[in-house]
Structures are given as C-alpha cells and as structure tokens.
Image (cartoon, helix red, strand yellow):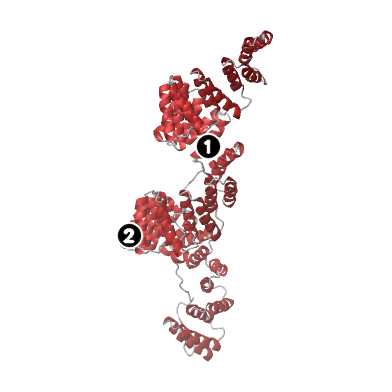
C-alpha cells in the first residue's frame, strides 16, 4: 500500500513587499536655507537668478511644482552654473512625476558637484521610483562611499535589495541603518521582513518586536510579528498577537483568517474551520480562507464538503493550481482515480513544474494499480523535487512488490536520509531484512520504527512475527499483544497470535485467534487453513473439514488444504472422495509424489492394483528417492505375487533408511 501523506501546504505565504514595507521617500535638497541676495553682493544677472530661485522655492514649498520649475528654469537661463539649480529642478521634477527629467537634472548637478552625497541620494530615489534598481543601488552606494553614516542611504539601499530579493544584502544594509538610527520603526520592520523572507524567523521576531516598541498600536507590525511567531513554531505567541488584533479590528476577515491558520497548525481543525467560516461570512470571495477551509475539511474527513469549497474557488478562478490540486487529492481519497487524474493534469498544465502535483498523480496511478504509469510518475516527481521522501518510499514499495529488494532497500534508505523519523520506512526495511533471513537487522529496524512511533501496531506485529520464527514465543506474544492493544482490527496480528498458539499446541486459544482473524478478513486463506489444523488437533473433525473446504472456496489450488481434507476423508473411509482430492492436486501438480503415493495406497486398499501400480511406480521416480514409497510399491508387488520385484523395493527402502541415519 503506498504511503498517502496529506499533501503539503505552507500555512503562510510570502509577505507582500509593496504592502508590507515602510519606506520614507523624503527628498533631500541639499540646501539648509535660501540666501537673500543684496544688490551690492553680486552681478546683476546672478542677483536676478537668485530672485527666481527664491521665488521658485516658495512655489515648491507650496506644492506648486510646475510654477517652481518655470522659475528655476528662468534662473538657469540667467546663470547656467548657479549653485544647486539642477538639484532644485530635479527635486521639482521628481515631485511632479517627471522622473526622466529629474534624473537628467540630478546627473547635471552631480557633474558640477560630484562630492555632495545628497544629490546622489536623490538620484537613487529617482531610479528607485521607476524601478531601475541596479542604478538605484549604485547611486546609494556612492552616497555611502562619501558618507558611510548616511542612514537614509543604508535604509533605501536595504529597501531596494528587498525589492530585488537580494535578502542577505538587504539584511546588512538595514542592520547598518538601525545601528545608526535605532528610532526608526520602519527600518526595524523592513529588517524583520528581510529576515522572514530568509526563513530566519527568530531574528524576524526580534526585529518586529523592536518596531512594535516604537509603534505599539501598529496593526501591520502586529500581523507580521504573529506570522513570524507562527513560522517559528510559537503558535501560542502567534495566537496572542492575533487575538490582540481581533480586539482592535473585530470585523477584519484577514485577522480571522490568520487565526484560523494558527489553529490549523496547532491541529485544532474545528476551531480553524470556525475562523475560516467567519472570515468568509465577512468576505465570501476570500479565496485563501476558502482553500484553507477545504484543507481543514479534508483533515477532518469531510471530503464532499471540502470538494464543494474547492469548487467554489474554481468558479472564481478556474485555472487556480491549488484548488485543482486539492480536488485531485479529494478524489483520490474517494477512490475516483480517473476524475482525480483529470484534475491533477489540469493543475500540472496551469503552473510551473511541481513535485507535489506529480507525486499526487503518481499516487493516483499507484492506487489504481497502474504500476507502470506510477513508476514513471514517481520518478518524474523525484526529478522535479528530489527532497520528497514519500516519493522514494512509494517507489520502493512497488519495487519490493516486483522482487527488486536491493533497489527497494536503496530507496527506503534515501527516504530515511530525507526524513530521519520516517517510521514506515524503517518498518519496511525490516520486512526486507526478514525476507532475506537477516533476523537481527530486521529486529533492529522494527525496534527503530517503534522508537519513532510507539503506537505503530504494524511494526509491533512484524517484530512479533520475527520472534515467532526464531522460536521466542514469549517475546512474540508480548509484541503481538501490544499490536492488538493499539489496533484490535489488525487482522495480521490476530493471525500471528493464532499461529503462535498453534505452534505451542495451545489449540483452544489458537481457534479463538484464527476465528477473530477470519471475522476481520473473511478471505484470509491461511487463517482458514490454520483453523482447520487447530480444530483437527482438538478432534473436532467436522468443523475442521468445513474450514478446509472454506480454504478451497477461496483458492481451489491450495494443495495443503486438499491434503488435509483427503486425510480426513480417508480416515472416514470415504475413499472415493479422498481420491478426487488427490486427483485435483495432480491436476495442478502432476509430479507431486506424495499425492501419487497416497493415490496408489488408496487404490491398493480398493484392490485396484493396476491403478495402484500406475501411481506408485510414478511416485518412486525423481531425484530424491523416498523410502516409504519403495516400501509401498514392494507391498503392492507382494500382493500381486511379484516377490522378486517386491524384495528389490524393500531392499531399496532399507538402503535409503540406512543412508539417512
């Protein structure tokens, strides 16, 4: 049976940078104040240019940027080298949204005054605004080269690195920013985002806490902190944060959705379902809440309700991969494999390569006994995502079923290397060792499985089975009883217990255990056979006969049952019926020497000597002579008056008996 884990899902998505990042985009002009020109201080042209600059600056401060630009340009026509004029133009253009003109103006200013950090900083802001991030990074780096303590440059550089997903660089820049100015909650928040995206959740928590100290009522920080707590595994702390948020924003569906995520991670599906339903009541088209609701419903066995939730999402977004995958998984659970394949193939075609989708497709083929397709699909899922332990495990199960134990063992070992607590893999390794007769290795593997999963009934049963084969019946019964205590419906454990009782001649207990096995697994062939043997040992011949006949209903070719049944019929002098049983054995195994011998004896007793000779003469042939068959043939020759032939057979029997001692 393939391993059928819940398909994996991440409870928290990536933070949306455009929403989550807080960045001051203040533009620095590089002027502490505008000087007022006196008529005696400069040439007339320079004096008039200064007037236009001051007038333009006044308009700029009033937010009238177009008029400000006009005044600055008038000043520029009077004095092309007027100090800071290009920077002033750049700032006005930037405020107007004329980014290209702003960039040209800042570049012109930098040519005149290349060592002033503020102009490079404003140029970086302009590039940042049009998402020319490489150029923005270069500009901010120039600022830092001029002034390594320019906190605003470190701050914006960190922001740009975040936008570029250069997370390590973002962390370094933002750490420098908060070292220079620890009072900016924006910088602490952005640093938290950078750590979060690097999956360094403990550091993210510390950064968000710093931001929250500076902005205690900021819901965005509280939300980010809760998410970081959740990913760090501190679900109680996450829940506390969300509960605080719910008090201040009781009707926010997003908060109820996030609380649902916490409950789901804690395994509290009923509570999670209630939160997701509340979020959907406020916002019926909240797709993420509906998907998580569907997953919780799946976890609680409400497959049809889960499919309805996934179906609602697909009505809104027909090509959404996650609900297509979810529908496929739900249909697998319902055993509707053809429909499941259709949904999974749709999911596969709608997005990038996904090892998880390919794994579910393989699992579907596997459960539908489409083994060739399953093998190909498992191999493909491993190619896409080599870190899926269940894919290696399920492929190993198939290989083991095909007799490829060496290949299966390697795959089980690979699954364990990826998932060291994979108890099922250790258990299956144990079965391979047991089949190879490596008893100690098998016991060690089963013990490891049990140490990882103490309530693993199958592993306890398997260990008991190994002890049974070694004759350690006391330990065998102890392990098997543990298995039954964990899972009373594990028919294999009841069968093994019955076999132990039979082997220790505790036949009454064996009968009870075999009957329990048959109740759980009515077509368990070996259990019916064992029950017949135990009943026969108790001289309950009629019931034993019925058990052997039950075996033959299940499997008409079971030779052991036919021998047992023929033996009972012979003891009851129902020779004709016994002969039919032996002939049925020979129909499937023409060279079965015991059946040939027994048929010869039955015909001998019936005085049908020709038929008896036909079977006994054939029975003595073969590579492994048997003394008792030669003796029986000698008796037949004697009865037929062929004494010389009889003596020859008796001598062969004596010789074979002597050679075995």
Mark 2 Cα within 10 Å, few/some/many (few <14, many 20+)?
A: some
With 496 as the anchor, is 590 left or right in this view? right
In the depicted structure, whether residue 629 falls above or below residue 459: above
**Res 501 seen here:** no
Q: Residue at x 42, y 29 (%)?
A: 515
* Of residues 452 and 644, the one drawn nearer to the viewer in this rendering: 644
Sequence order check, earlier mark of 2 and 1: 2
Element at label 2 = helix
On residue 428, which mark appears? 1
Residue at 44% from the left image edge and 23% from the top image edge: 542
How busy is the neighbourhood of tag 1: few (under 14 within 10 Å), some, or many (20 plus)?
Answer: many
Image x and y of residue 61, in percent: 42, 81
| Relative side of 24 to 404, left or right | left
Residue 407 pos. (x, y %): 61, 39
In the rendered image, is residue 375 in sight?
yes
> Which disc is residue 246 wearing?
2
- Real-space Cα separation, disc 2 to disc 1, in angstroms: 48 Å
Q: Secondary structure at mark 1?
A: helix
Tally the numbered discs.
2
Can you say whether 43 is above or below 31 in the image?
Answer: below
Q: State the image coordinates of residue 585 (x, y, percent, origin top left).
A: 58, 27
Residue 516: quadrant of the picture:
top left
Q: Are marks 2 and 1 in contact (CB under 8 Å)?
A: no
Quadrant including the C terminus: top right
Q: Residue 543 location, x and y as percent?
A: 43, 25
Q: Is residue 643 above or below residue 246?
A: above
Residue 390's place in the image compared with 588, above or below, is below
């Amino acid at each position: 049976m393939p391993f059928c884990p819940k398909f994996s899902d991440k409870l928290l998505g990536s933070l949306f940078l455009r929403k989550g990042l807080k960045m001051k985009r203040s533009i620095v002009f590089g002027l502490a104040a505008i000087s007022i020109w006196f008529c005696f201080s400069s040439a007339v042209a320079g004096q008039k240019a200064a007037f236009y600059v001051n007038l333009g600056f006044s308009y700029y401060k009033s937010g009238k940027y177009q008029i400000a630009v006009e005044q600055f340009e008038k000043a520029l026509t009077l004095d092309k080298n007027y100090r800071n004029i290009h920077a002033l133009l750049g700032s006005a253009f930037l405020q107007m949204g004329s980014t290209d003109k702003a960039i040209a103006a800042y570049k012109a200013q930098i040519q005149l005054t290349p060592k002033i950090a503020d102009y490079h900083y404003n140029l970086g802001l302009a590039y940042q605004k049009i998402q020319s991030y490489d150029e923005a990074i270069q500009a901010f780096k120039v600022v830092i080269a001029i002034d390594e303590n320019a906190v605003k440059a470190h701050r914006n550089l960190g922001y740009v690195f975040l936008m570029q997903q250069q997370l390590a660089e973002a962390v370094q820049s933002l750490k420098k920013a908060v070292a220079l100015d620890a009072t900016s909650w924006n910088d602490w928040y952005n640093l938290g985002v950078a750590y979060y995206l690097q999956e360094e959740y403990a550091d993210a928590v510390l950064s968000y806490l710093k931001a929250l100290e500076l902005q205690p009522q900021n819901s965005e920080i509280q939300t980010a902190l809760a998410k970081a707590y959740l990913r760090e595994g501190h679900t109680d702390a996450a829940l506390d944060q969300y509960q605080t948020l719910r008090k201040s924003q009781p009707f926010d569906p997003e908060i109820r959705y996030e609380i649902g995520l916490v409950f789901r991670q804690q395994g509290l599906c009923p509570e999670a379902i209630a939160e997701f339903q509340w979020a959907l009541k406020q916002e019926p088209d909240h797709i993420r809440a509906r998907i998580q609701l569907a997953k919780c419903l799946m976890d609680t066995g409400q497959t049809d309700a889960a499919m309805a939730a996934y179906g609602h999402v697909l009505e809104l977004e027909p090509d959404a991969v996650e609900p297509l995958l979810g529908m496929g998984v739900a249909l697998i659970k319902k055993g509707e494999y053809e429909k499941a394949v259709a949904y999974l193939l749709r999911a596969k075609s709608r997005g990038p390569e996904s090892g998880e989708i390919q794994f579910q497709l393989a699992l579907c083929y596997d459960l539908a006994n489409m083994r060739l397709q399953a093998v190909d699909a498992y191999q493909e899922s491993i190619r896409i995502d080599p870190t899926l332990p269940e894919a290696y495990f399920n492929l190993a199960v198939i290989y083991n079923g095909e007799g490829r134990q060496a290949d299966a063992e390697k795959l089980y070992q690979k699954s364990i290397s990826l998932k060291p607590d994979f108890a099922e893999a250790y258990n299956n390794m144990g079965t391979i060792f047991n089949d190879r007769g490596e008893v100690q290795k098998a016991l060690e593997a089963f013990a490891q499985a049990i140490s990882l999963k103490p309530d693993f009934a199958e592993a306890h049963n398997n260990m008991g089975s190994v002890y049974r084969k070694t004759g350690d019946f006391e330990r065998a019964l102890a392990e098997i009883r543990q298995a039954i205590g964990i899972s009373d419906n594990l028919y294999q454990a009841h069968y093994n217990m019955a076999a132990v009782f039979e082997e220790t001649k505790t036949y009454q207990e064996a009968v009870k255990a075999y009957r329990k096995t048959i109740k759980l697994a009515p077509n368990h062939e070996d259990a019916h056979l064992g029950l017949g043997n135990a009943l026969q040992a108790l001289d309950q011949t009629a019931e034993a006969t019925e058990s052997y006949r039950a075996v033959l209903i299940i499997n008409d070719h079971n030779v052991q049952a036919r021998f047992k049944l023929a033996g009972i019929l012979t003891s009851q002098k129902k020779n004709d019926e016994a002969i039919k049983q032996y002939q049925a054995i020979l129909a499937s195994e023409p060279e079965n020497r015991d059946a040939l011998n027994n048929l010869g004896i039955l015909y001998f007793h019936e005085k049908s000597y020709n038929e008896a000779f036909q079977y006994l003469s054939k029975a003595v042939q073969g590579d492994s002579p048997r003394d008792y068959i030669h003796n029986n043939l000698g008796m037949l020759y004697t009865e037929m008056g062929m004494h010389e032939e009889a003596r020859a057979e008796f001598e062969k029997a004596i010789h074979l008996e002597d050679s075995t001692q």
